[in-house]
Image: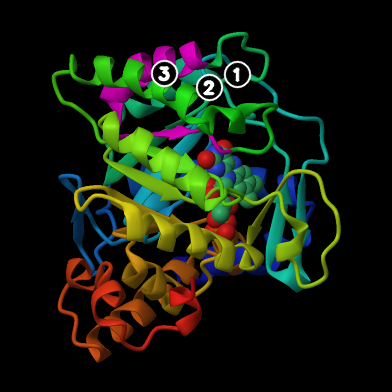
Amino acid sequence: MLNILHHYIGTKVLNRLEPELSHAIALCYLRLLNHRFSRMKGATSGLKTKICGMELASPIGLAAGFDKNADVFNATLSLGFGFVEVGTITPNPQTGNPKPRLFRLPEENALINKMGFNNKGMLYASKNAEKPKLGIVGVNIGANAKSINKVLDYTNIFEFLAHLFDYVTINVSSPNTKNLRDLQKPEMLEKILKNVKSINVSLKRQVPIFVKIAPDLSENNVTEILDACEENGVSGLIATNTTISPKTLKKPTAFEGGLSGKPLLRQSNKILRLLAKKKNESTVLIGVGGIFSGKDIYEKIRMGASAVQVYTSFVYNGPRHVKNMEAELKKLLLDDGYGTIESAVGDPLRSKRRLDPIYFSP
Ligand SMILES: Cc1cc2nc3c(=O)[nH]c(=O)nc-3n(C[C@H](O)[C@H](O)[C@H](O)COP(=O)(O)O)c2cc1C
C-alpha cells in the first residue's frame, strides 16, 4: 500500500510541478521517511555483487545529484537502490546557479540542468554521514565555484569526508561550474589524484576512489584520463556525467547546462566501451547515462560495467522503477545463462553474443 502511494506521488503528482520544486518536495518526503527506513532492511534483490571490496545489494545505484547533502541515503537505499552516491559536495556551502536551472524534456525522456553544485558544504554532510547506513554510500566531491585553488578543494574535502563514506568519487566532469572540466586534463587530474592518494594511504580504512568523467571527450582524452587514473591508484571510473552536446537530441536545439536521460545513452555507452577496451583488468567501471530499462543496464554490464547508476529515469518513473528494472535485468541474465552479475561483466568483449552490433562498431 505504502509502495503504491510512493509511486503515485512520485510519478503522477510530482511530475506536474515545476521541476526543482518537485525535487524539493520529494526530498522532504524522503527525509520524513528516512528515519523510518533506517530501522528497516536495505535493498534485497538477489542481484548482490561485489566491487572494490564493497558488497552491493544490487548493481543498480542512485547517481550523484539527487541527494546533494546526504540527507536521505537510507530512504533511497530502501527504495531498492543497491548503493547510492551523495553529493556533489564542495568544501564550503554554495547556492549554485540562478533559477530556473532544471528543465524537463518529456518528449525526449531527458532533463537539462545547470544547478552548479548547490549544496550545504562538507561540514553539514559530515554530520549526516555519521548516521548508520543501510547499505553502500559513496560521496561525490567537487570544487567551489569561487575557489581560486580547485585542486586544493578536492584535497581538503577528501581529507574531511573520505573516512565517513564507503567510497569517494572525484567529480571533474560537471559542465555547470566554470572550467571544472579542465581538471580532466592529465596534468591537473594527476595533481588531484596524487594529493588524495597520499591522504588515502594514511587512513585507517582506505577507500576506493572513482573518477567521474564527461561524455564529451575524444578517444585520446579518454585514454589520457584512464592512464592518469591507473597510474595514481584510482579504483575505477564512472562514465558518464551529463552531455553539453545538443546533437544527441532527436530534435537538436541549443541549450545551456548538462543533458541527461535517453539522449545520453549512446554517447555514454561509447565512452564506457572505450574504457572497457583499454583499461587494466583491475580497474572497475560504473556505467551511468540514459538508463531507462533492465535491458539498458544489461547492455552496460556486458559492455564492461560492474555496476550502474540512474538518475533521470528515476525522476520520470518514480520509486517502483528500480524494482521493475531489477526484475527485467534478472530475467535477461537468467535467459543468457549468467548465474551472477560478475560473470556477465564485459562478457560481449569475449563472446560477442546477442548485443546490439552498434556497440562493437569502431
Ligand atoms: C538535476 C541533476 C543534478 C545532477 N547533479 C550532479 C552532481 O551534483 N554531481 C554529479 O557528479 N552528477 C550530477 N548529475 C549527473 C548524474 O549523476 C548522471 O551522471 C547523469 O544525469 C546521467 O545519468 P541519467 O541519464 O541516468 O540521468 C546530475 C544530474 C541531474 C539531472
Earlier sequence position, callout 3 versus callout 1:
1
| Magenta run includes residue 109 | no
Q: In the image, what residue occupies the spot 36% across and 88% down? A: 354
- Residue 113, compared with residue 118, is above or below; it is below
Measure how far apart labels 1 and 2 are at the Cα level: 6 Å
Tags 1 and 2 in contact by the CB under 8 Å rule?
A: yes
Residue 310 point in image, percent of width and height:
49, 58
Dot 3 falls on a residue whose secondary structure is helix
Q: Which residue is mark 1?
A: 144
Question: Foreground: 354 or 15?
Answer: 354
Dot 2 falls on a residue whose secondary structure is loop
Question: Foreground: 274 or 107?
Answer: 274
Q: In the image, what residue occupies the spot 20% across and 60% down? A: 49
Dot 1, how many residues are within 10 Å of its Cα: few (below 14), some (14-19), or many (20+)? many
Earlier sequence position, callout 2 versus callout 3:
2
Q: Which mark is residue 90?
A: 2
- From the viewer's perspective, is 23 left or right of 255? left
- Residue 92, compared with residue 303, is above or below; it is above
- From the viewer's perspective, is 75 left or right of 133? right
Q: Nearer the viewer, mark 3 or mark 1?
A: 3
**Image quadrant in which you'd find residue 195:** top left
Question: Foreground: 145 or 221?
Answer: 221
Q: Which mark is residue 191?
A: 3
Q: Which mark is residue 62?
A: none
Q: Quadrant of the N terminus?
A: bottom left
Amino acid type of the residue that numbered disc 2 sits on in the rendered structure: Thr
Q: Residue furthest top?
A: 148
Magenta region's main secondary structure? helix
Q: Which residues are magenta?
A: 151-173
